[in-house]
């Protein structure tokens, strides 16, 4: 055991010696490092000849400069830059939600809505709060049925962190909005927005439309946009980093204010029925379009204004525009009423005055204006009374009547009847038509004006002109608005329609009697109403082709067929215009008496039913056959 103990003691001794050597080496290294460090910091400071004050001064200057810069920075942050940083801070945590104001309603004369606001929801996203732009775009694409390109565009917008607002679904159906919000996508929200709806699709042409932002861009929506537009409100709230509202901050809420209300002269029930009648006839005839206007004889108030136009796909809608006001056409034979009325009012002729009317006649022969006028129907030279000329719609007979008074006088009457100037309705885009000063009339213009060529008229101008006959010779301007109600509920009634005397009462009654004969015995027979008298006049005009002529290069013609009349003839309450634009030119339905007159009869029956109209006195409508004094019909 002593041997073992000795061996162990030897090993312990050797370990102790090794530790001592290692410790002495470490002590040496530490001392050496300490000396080197001391030398580094004290270099140049050994001895009294060295002064550390310059170095300390430099150190002090550096510290002072740094402190001044820091102080200047703090001052700038709290003064000059304070507003910018405050705004950035507020913008970072503040969300502003616009409360869209409801657009005011457009209603009919009885307060029934024609155009009204409808609730919708607009879904949007704040890219600053969206965590997964691609995932959000993909999620909503399935609900909105977006194509791949639209999905990529949405994802790109959501990745733009400099933006705070991106539309996802504008004015969406509530069910669609709920489906998107149910996904719980961070940064996606919605707000209530007011859309626009019509109570009938046929109102589109008259009422007009608004854009996606609720701004009127056509029709009455445009004309009264300022009055109908409400004042938007807003909600201002502060949110945390997760986009949730900060409960400690109540936010700021400004309620929206709805727009005013427009009360029109339209009767919604009559408008709806007239829309259907016109559309049905236009479709049946395969025409390009059609229009109808119902006007109160005494007040000029428009009870309905219908427009239908064929679309490129062959369908018929009222979306293209209010063509009865914004487009002008050569009116054709309807204006024979004015040519004859002017001559009668000047005392040049009366209903019984006779003219020898040829089947055709050359005018300005031997001059550059040489022109052959043929009558509306073939015949040999025939004696015709003014009454017969009106009833059978003789072109040459009307020309002869118009020549009994000066051109200047004819022109003056056309102006009094309202041609060549816009109506007081001042509908957006309304046409004034064309009526050149009489001094500029050349050649055929001095002839054809008598039977409806050489100048143009809108349907609104034409119905107001014929209404002058119905209104005992007094022109009354058409009217489309009864009153407005502003945002504060203050009502303002529109003034009564302006009026002026054109014909004497005697002349108006004499012309009315002849127009009644037109319906009973002449070209307007299909406008008859059972048990009630109707006065009216047919019109069929050729339309100019692209080559500037009335006959196309292929030898075909296009027609504009119309009928304007009033009922009851012995005490008129309503004047009605019907026009059919380009009916099938290869059928007998291309004329005013066959294309437009039947529509008048159907509209007349609507007016009888809806307005509870009854014949007055001994009015029994058309009774008996064609009088012998009118001779055979053509």
Image (tube, grey):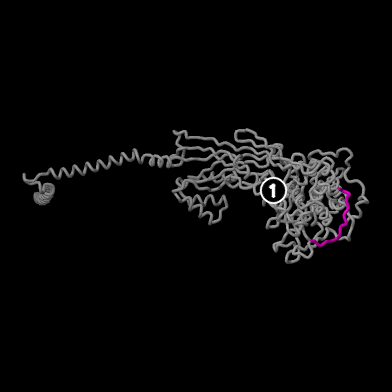
Write the residue at 91% across / 55% down.
Answer: 632
Where does label 1 land, which residue? 421
Q: Residues within 10 Å of mark 1 (few under 14, many from 20)?
A: some
Front one among 404 and 334: 404
The C terminus lies in quadrant:
bottom right
Q: Which residues are magenta?
A: 350-363
Write the residue at 72% across / 42% down.
Answer: 477
Q: Is residue 542 visible?
A: yes
User: Residue 344 at what x, y percent from top left?
Assistant: 83, 47
Dot 1 falls on a residue whose secondary structure is loop
Residue 480: in magenta span: no
Q: Is residue 8 visible?
A: no
Question: Within the image, what quadrant is residue 498 found in?
Answer: top right
- Locate residue 524 relative to residue 18 in the image: left or right: right
User: Residue 145 at what x, y percent from top left?
Assistant: 57, 52
User: Residue 599 at what x, y percent from top left?
Assistant: 79, 49
| Count of numbered tags | 1
Residue 351: in magenta span: yes
Front one among 538 and 128: 538
Q: Residue pushed farthest right?
A: 628
């Amino acid at each position: 055991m002593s041997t073992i103990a000795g061996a162990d003691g030897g090993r312990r001794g050797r370990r102790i010696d090794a530790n001592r050597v290692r410790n002495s080496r470490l002590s040496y290294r530490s001392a050496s490092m300490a000396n080197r460090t001391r030398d580094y910091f004290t270099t140049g400071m050994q001895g009294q000849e060295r002064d550390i004050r310059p170095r300390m001064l430099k150190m002090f200057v550096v510290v002072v400069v740094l402190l001044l810069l820091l102080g200047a920075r703090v001052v700038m942050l709290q003064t000059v830059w304070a507003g910018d940083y405050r705004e950035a801070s507020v913008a970072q945590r503040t969300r502003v939600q616009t409360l869209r104001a409801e657009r005011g309603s457009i209603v009919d004369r009885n307060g029934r809505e024609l155009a009204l606001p409808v609730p919708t929801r607009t879904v949007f996203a704040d890219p600053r709060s969206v965590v997964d732009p691609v995932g959000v775009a993909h999620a909503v694409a399935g609900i909105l049925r977006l194509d791949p390109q639209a999905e990529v565009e949405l994802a790109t917008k959501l990745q733009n962190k400099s933006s705070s607002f991106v539309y996802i679904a504008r004015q969406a159906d509530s069910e669609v909005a709920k489906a998107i919000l149910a996904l719980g996508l961070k940064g996606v929200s919605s707000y209530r927005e007011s859309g626009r709806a019509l109570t009938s699709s046929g109102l589109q042409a008259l009422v007009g439309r608004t854009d996606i932002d609720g701004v009127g861009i056509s029709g009455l929506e445009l004309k009264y946009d300022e009055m109908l537009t409400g004042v938007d409100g807003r909600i201002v709230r502060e949110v945390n980093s997760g986009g949730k509202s900060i409960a400690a901050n109540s936010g700021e809420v400004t309620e929206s204010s709805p727009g005013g209300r427009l009360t029109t002269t339209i009767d919604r029930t009559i408008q709806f029925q007239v829309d259907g009648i016109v559309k049905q006839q236009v479709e049946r005839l395969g025409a390009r379009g059609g229009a109808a206007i119902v006007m109160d004889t005494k007040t000029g108030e428009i009870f309905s204004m219908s427009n239908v136009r064929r679309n490129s796909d062959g369908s018929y809608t009222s979306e293209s525009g209010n063509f009865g006001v914004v487009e002008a056409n050569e009116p054709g034979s309807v204006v024979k009423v004015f040519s004859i009325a002017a001559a009668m009012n000047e005392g040049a002729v009366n209903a019984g005055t006779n003219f020898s009317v040829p089947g055709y006649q050359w005018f300005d022969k031997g001059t550059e204006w040489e022109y052959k006028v043929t009558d509306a129907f073939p015949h040999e030279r025939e004696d015709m009374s003014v009454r017969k000329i009106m009833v059978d719609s003789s072109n040459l007979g009307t020309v002869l009547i118009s020549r009994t008074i000066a051109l200047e006088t004819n022109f003056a009457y056309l102006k009094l009847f309202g041609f060549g100037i816009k109506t007081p309705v001042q509908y957006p885009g309304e046409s004034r038509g064309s009526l050149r000063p009489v001094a500029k009339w050349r050649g055929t213009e001095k002839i054809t004006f008598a039977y409806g060529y050489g100048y143009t008229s809108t349907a609104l101008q034409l119905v107001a002109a014929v209404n002058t006959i119905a209104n005992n010779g007094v022109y009354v301007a058409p009217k489309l608005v009864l009153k407005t109600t502003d945002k504060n509920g203050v009502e303002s009634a529109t003034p009564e329609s302006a009026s002026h005397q054109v014909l004497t009462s005697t002349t108006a009654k004499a012309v009315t009697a002849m127009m009644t004969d037109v319906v009973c015995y002449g070209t307007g027979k299909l406008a008859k109403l059972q048990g009630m008298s109707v006065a009216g006049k047919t019109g069929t005009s050729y339309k100019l082709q692209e080559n500037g002529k009335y006959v196309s290069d292929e030898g075909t013609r296009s027609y504009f067929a119309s009928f304007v009349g009033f009922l009851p003839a012995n005490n008129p309450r309503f004047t009605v215009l019907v026009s059919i634009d380009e009916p099938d030119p290869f059928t007998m339905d291309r004329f005013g008496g066959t294309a437009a007159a039947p529509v008048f009869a159907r509209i007349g029956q609507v007016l009888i039913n809806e307005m509870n109209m009854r014949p007055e006195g001994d009015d029994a409508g058309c009774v008996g056959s064609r009088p012998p004094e009118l001779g055979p019909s053509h």
